[in-house]
Structures are given as C-alpha cells and as structure tokens.
Amino acid sequence: MKKLKLTLVLLLLIISASQAQVSIENEINQAVWKPFMESWASYDAVTYNSLHTDDVLRPGRNSLTVGQDYKDRNTRSFAASAERNGKRSIHFSFEQRVYSENRGYEVGYYKVIDQREGQAERTFYGRFHVVLRKENGQWKIAQDWDTNSLRGKPISQEDWDRGTPLEF
C-alpha cells in the first residue's frame, strides 16, 4: 500500500511539473514567439528589439554582439531589408524547451521564406539556441545563437521536421 501511495504522489508531481512547463511554454509563445514572427514579417525593428533584454548576448561565428549594439544592428538590417520591397516570414520548430520559474532554454529550427519583388520565393533554414529570462513579469530573449549548418551540413527541411512546429 505504501508503494502505491508513493507511486501516486510521484505521478501527481510529474503531472503537475509537466502542466507548469506547458503553461510557461504557452506564455512564452504569446509573449515572445508570436510578436517575434509578426515583427520579423513587418520589418518592425522596434517591436523586435523590445523582445530582447537590454543586455542580450548574440554570439556569432567570430564575434560577440551585446545589448544596444545588437539592437542597433537589427534596426539597420530591418530597414535595409524593407527597402528591397520583399515579403518574408519566419517559422519555428522546437526540439527542446525547458524552463524554471524565470529562465528558459529552447533549441530548434527556423525556416525563413523570402519573396523579393520580381524573384522566385526562397526558403532558408537554420538551427537556434535561445536563453529566455523573465524580467518584470515579461519573458524576453537574453541570448540568441543560430547557425545555418550542423556538422558541416546545411540545415534542411529534414532537420526542421525533427522538431515540433510552433502553431497558434
């Protein structure tokens, strides 16, 4: 009987922890990923930058961009992209999503669909690792790293398919 009670208690704890993770995941989807996708598509650098902490860390291949420098680069990049008169969208597929009360770590793939005026639609894939932090009740991206290859092989639709697509 003691084993049954212990098993039931452990099962309830696991279910409770799982529900908490799903609740945080849903909160992050609405607070970060939905406006991220919308601001990316509309070239809205102000909203896009507001989704990142003031001390955001962006590792690159041979560089490290931090805070306002990262946000200024986004502003310039969004403006230059908007001038090309194109439409773009970004989509996410997740492999790993784990959270504590005020921190999160997510790994997955992104798919960018780019349609420039007078050109054929192009699709690009990449892999990302994101650290999230909750500040003043708001989830934000604190670290963002991505690559377009994995072990020397370009990221593809096949990689994308390994994750769980974000849907609203």
Image (cartoon, helix red, strand yellow):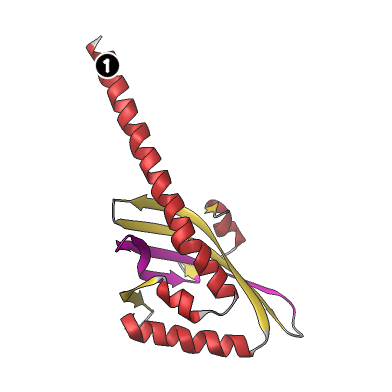
Residue at the location (35% across, 76% down)? 59
Residue at the location (53% across, 79% down)? 44
151 inside magenta stretch = no
> For the residue carrying disc 1, how many other residues have a C-alpha within 10 Å: few (<14), some (14-19), or many (20+)?
few
Count the labels in the image.
Answer: 1
Q: Tell whether 130 sits left or right of 125.
A: left
Q: Which residue is mark 1?
A: 5
Can you give x and y, in whole percent of width and height, for residue 154 in the image?
Answer: 54, 69
Residue at the location (51% across, 67% down)? 35
Judging depth in this view, the residue of 49 and 104 nearest the camera is 49
**Residue 53's image quarter?**
bottom left
132 inside magenta stretch = yes
Which residues make up the magenta segment? 120-148
Judging depth in this view, the residue of 146 and 71 nearest the camera is 71
Seen as rendered, the residue at the extreme left is 2
Residue 153 can be seen, yes or no: no
* Residue 37, above or below 7: below
Instruction: Please name the amino acid that badge 1 sits on.
Output: Lys
